[in-house]
Image: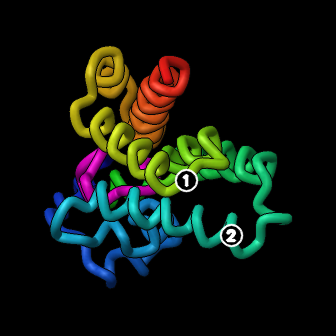
Amino acid sequence: MTQTEQPPTTILQPTWQFMLAHPAHILALGFGSGLSRIMPGTVGTLFGWLCFHIFTTRWPELFTPLTWGILIVGGFIIGVWACDITGHHMGVADHGAMVWDEIIAIWLVLVMISPADFRAQCWAFVLFRFFDMVKPPPIRNIERRFKGGFGVMIDDILAAFFALLCYALYEFAS
């Protein structure tokens, strides 16, 4: 950092104005779902679930598993960029308001369990949120090791993996 460059100010609660100031902020803050003052990660995950539901029921011929795969991989890559910039601008590498990682991860979970009824989707949601919040090893270890946008995104993908593993074990045992 040069002498003329000021360190970013830590933003405790982002606003709509902050979100609209940069395209990366819009994406990282989940199109506003991360602005929730109460449990923004859960609100962002619910927003992702709602988008998945609307897109797959309204345009099923367009939103196929292949399309979702492309969106998830592309969304992960773009999310690394968006979360890196937004985290820098907020002065916090992984601010709770950044929920694009939850959106991409819940899409991954939902596409992998599809077609699933509402009850199964609810359990997948609960499992994902559990692993995302608790961050058991190795999720926490990887979160600490990787910083910036990649670190923000990868821990949620791992939480999605753990949720899918539990879901698959339940299905196998049933």
Residue at screen point 39% across, 26% down: 146
Q: CA distance from mark 2 to mark 1?
A: 13 Å
> Which of the pair 9/46 is nearer the observer?
46
Which corner quadrant of the image does residue 166 belong to?
top left
**Label placed on residue 138:** none
Residue 83 visible in rendering: no
Q: Residue at x 48, y 50 (%)?
A: 121
Observer-nearest residue: 10 or 75? 75
- Lateral position of residue 42 relative to residue 61, left or right: left
Q: Residue at x 71, y 51 (%)?
A: 68
Residue 109 in view of the camera: yes
Q: Which residue is mark 1?
A: 117
Amino acid type, callout 2: Thr
* Percent coordinates x, y for residue 145 in the rendering: 34, 20
Q: Position of residue 87 (x, y in %)?
A: 34, 52
**Which residue position holds label 2?**
57
Taking the image as shown, residue 8 lies to the left or right of residue 98, namely: left
The crowd level at tag 1 (other Cα within 10 Å; few <14, some 14-19, many 20+) is few
Residue type marked 1: Asp
| Left/right of residue 146 with respect to residue 48 in the rendered view | left
Q: Quadrant of the N terminus?
A: top left
The tag earlier along the polypeptide, 2 or 1, is 2
* Residue stretch in magenta: 90-102
Q: Nearer the viewer, residue 146 or 128?
A: 128
Q: Position of residue 46 (x, y in %)?
A: 39, 62
Which of the two discs, 2 and 1, sits closer to the camera?
A: 1
Q: Is residue 131 magenta?
A: no
- Residue 94 is a magenta residue: yes
